[in-house]
Structure formats: structure tokens, C-alpha cells
Image (spheres, rainbow, N blue to C red):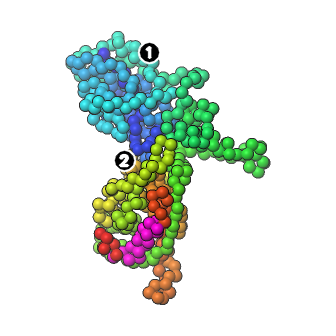
Amino acid sequence: MPSVREFPLPDLGEGLTSAEIVRWLVEVGDVIAVDQPVAEVETAKAVVEVPCPYGGVVTARFGEAGTEVPVGAALVTVAVSPPAGGSPAPTDTGSASGSGSGSGSGSGNVLVGYGTSESSSSRRRRVTSPLSAPTTSAAAAPLAAAPVAAGQSTAAQSTAVRAAVAPAPTGRAAVAATPAAQPSGPVAVISPLVRRLAREQGIDLAALTGSGPQGLILRADVDAAITRRARPTAAASPATSPAADDVVVPLKGVARLAAATFTRSRREIPDATCWVDADATALLAARGALNAGSAPQDRIGLLPLLARICTAGLARHPELNSSVVTDQDGTATGVRRHSAVHLGFAAQTERGLAVPVVRDAHLRSTADLAVEMARLTAAARAGRLTPAELTGGTFTLNNYGVFGVDGSTPIINHPEAAMLGVGRIAEKPWVHQGELAVRRVVQLSFSFDHRVCDGATAGAFLRFVADAVESPTTLLRHL
């Protein structure tokens, strides 16, 4: 007979604990195939389609568009037909990570952190959450009265399953329409980072009301409690009181993730910044020579040239291509020097700032870097970057000169240890070969984690970059 499978939201990328439902791609009662996308979710500044590893009839959806769903919480439930000639699979509302779904109904399509290969013996620990309340037995009860005959076609089995299942209503199908009183028990916190932050700041999680789905306590709730505690208890003056026409714009999606990343970087990384002006006239001339006679799609921009300079500089100063290792309390215990340079670069899109990552940038030619950066930029602007293309960076290049500004103090992209910022290239008076001349000058800013190196190393790296900008032929010595 058919069995009900619960498909939880999988881990979509490194360090991500939740995702926001953008839109549903299926309705309750729809028949879906194995690995068919069931929802679009937004996380890590990308919209990702989530495929369900089970084929059958959708019996419930958990959450409407705009709902924040924690990793491991239920996304949909599916009534799955047993394999022809085989015994029915037991009803399982556990995690889809590493669990078999019955022969023939398992998924071969794996996102980060989940899959249904029966060859894997490991099972991901189920995240207990108010969002992942098991489907009520009433939803599965009609299945017992409608066995599916072995040998039926897939279409016939799906029809039989759909006829046997009483679809649950759209939305929080397993939650009553009127929220019940919050039961006593563990505090609704999934993220260990949120728990650690609350512990370090002396915040009682049990006294907080979570703003997440079903009262889930998020990092923003703990940050708000810290802010409230720091404010004076006196009533706000009329000058600071909110006006009747003030508008509060919620931090959602890209803005919320960016705010959390920036806050964590400022809180955890003791960063320092140094900067230098460089004459980029020769670099622009080199770009012109490389692109002479090239087709538009084969031309190399300034960003790939700067990326190539960065990889050469990191080869000379590997301390900066690293990340700090911490214990459970957040205390630094070591520095991990990465053997590969996975270069992130800032790309502005309509949905906000994205940081795609060029894998193994140190092994690529300048032309290859240009092609890959163009591909990732196009994917970012279309909102189709995968989680793998947005995570795992070891160093970031940020060209804020496109906004017409000269300088900045970049915020390091946690957990990386350094970021190079590039301002606009503008004509300025400059002493060149002993004479005053008008040259194309750029300001380079370099932010680094002071735990991985001292100022001498950071200064040496920045000086190397500046020298390569002023005289690109010097790179030949280091390639």
C-alpha cells in the first residue's frame, strides 16, 4: 500500500540554517516524479529549485510564499507507491538525508546534505522543530484502505494513490488554525550559533519570543534583545520617537542574509585596513593590447586582470589565503591555510550584492578567469547561482569603483581572512619619471584579519598588487 514520506528542507549550502520559500511549484494533490522540483527557495543570495527525492502524490505543503523554513523542517509530504512486486515501505517522516525510499523511488539527484541512496548507511540527525511536526495519522489513514496492485503502471499507481489520499489543506498543514499555547520544553532554537551568542551576551532564550515560523528564535531576535538591553530605560524624546508615517522595511532574503554576515564579520574578526594609490595607466594599456582585434565575447576586463594579480600575490603570501579555526566557544585555536585559491568577487544585482566564487582561480589563465567571471556574473544577475557557486571562497576581490567612489574599508567576507577593494580609476596629477603628468590613478584598499598575519605581511601583499598594477610585466617573473 502507499506510504507517506516527509521531505524536509535539505542543507542547501555551507553554514546555511534556513531558506525562504519564494514560490511553490506544485499543489496539494499533484502527482510528481522523482527529483521533480517542488519549490523555489531563496538562500545565500540565490533562488534555488528544490527537487523532491520521492515520486507520488503531494499530500501536504508546509508554509506559504515568504515563510522562513529551517533546514531539516518539513517542506512537503508525498504519498509514495511501493515498488512493483515488493513489500510496501514503512511510513517514515524522518530526514531524507541518506534514507532509502524503497527500491525505484529513491532519488539520484543530491543537493548538499541530503539524498536517498540506499547504499549510504549514515542518517542525518532529525532536527526537532515546531515546523516539522509529523503529519497526523488521519492523513495516512485512508491509505490502508486503498492498496495498489503490483504490476500496475506508474500512472495507474499514482492515480490510485491520489484517489486514496485525502489532501491536507495548503499551508501549515500539520498545524491547527488557531495556534495552541506554547508547550513547556526545549527552547525553539535550531542554530547553535544563536545559542552561543545568547550565552556569551547573557540573554535568556526562554524569555524571548521568536520572530521565526512557529516562534523559532532567530539571530535577529537575540541581536534585538542585546540592543534593547543597551538602550537607556528613559522614554524616547519626541525627536527620536517614531512618526506616524514612518515605514519599517523588514530584512528578508538577501538583505537579511547580508546583515547577518556583516554583523558576524564585525563581531568576530579583528580586522585592519591599509591602502595605497597606484598608477594604473600601464594596466589599462595592457588591457588594450590584450583585446586588440578580439571579438567582444573574448575581451578581457579589468577585474580578471586584478584577479590574476591577486592569485600571484597570494602565492607569495599564503598566510592571507586562510581562515581562523575556532572551538565551540568561538575562541581561536589555529589558522587553516588553504591549498587552493577560491576567489570570490562582488557582483551587484537587482536582488542585492552577490559574491560568486571562482573555483581554483590559481590554476586558471587570465582568459579563463575572464570567461568564468562573466558566466558567474550573468548567473548572479539572473538569480540562478547555485549554493556551491556562492560558498567556499577563501579570498574576495571587491571592485567598488564601479559606483564612482575612490576608497572604502571593506568588510571581510566571513570566514575568509582578507579582501582587496578597488576604487575608481580617475585622471589625477601624478609624478611620472620625475615630471608632473596626468595619469590614471586607482586607490587600493586591503582589509585583513589581524589574527592570521601582522601588518608587515599585509603591507607586502598590497605593495605587490600595486607594483603589478603600475607595471603588469613584472607579473611575468611570478607566473
Corner quadrant of residue 157:
top left
In front of the other: 217 or 230: 230
Residue at the front extreme of this rendering: 333
Query: Is residue 157 visible to us here?
Result: no
Label 1 secondary element: helix
In front of the other: 112 or 123: 123
| Residue located at (45% from left, 49% from top) | 333
Instruction: Say if 37 sits above or below 322 in the image.
Output: above
Q: Main secondary structure of the magenta part?
A: helix
Q: Do the CB atoms of the residues marked 1 and 2 lie less than 8 Å apart?
A: no
In front of the other: 163 or 221: 221
Instruction: Say if 396 sits above or below 169 in the image.
Output: below
Q: Which residue is mark 1?
A: 138
| Residue located at (35% from left, 11% from top) | 145
Corner quadrant of residue 371:
bottom left
| Residue located at (57% from left, 22% from top) | 183
Query: Is residue 71 visible to us here?
Result: yes
Q: Which residue is mark 2?
A: 388
How many residues crowd mark 1 within 10 Å: few (<14), some (14–19), many (20+)?
Answer: few
**Residue 431, magenta (yes or no):** no
Q: Pick the quarter of the image with the C terminus.
A: bottom left
Location of residue 284 in the rendering, given as x and y in whole percent from the top left corner: 40, 74
Corner quadrant of residue 295:
bottom left
Location of residue 127 in the rendering, given as x and y in whole percent from the top left corner: 44, 30
| Residue located at (46% from left, 84% from top) | 432
Q: Pick the quarter of the image with the N terminus.
A: top left
Please give the range of residues in magenta.
Answer: 456-473
The amino acid type of the residue labelled 2 equals Ala
Say which label, 1 or 2, has the lower sequence index.
Answer: 1
Label 2 secondary element: helix
Instruction: Say if 109 sits above or below 279 in the image.
Output: above
Residue at the top extreme of this rendering: 145
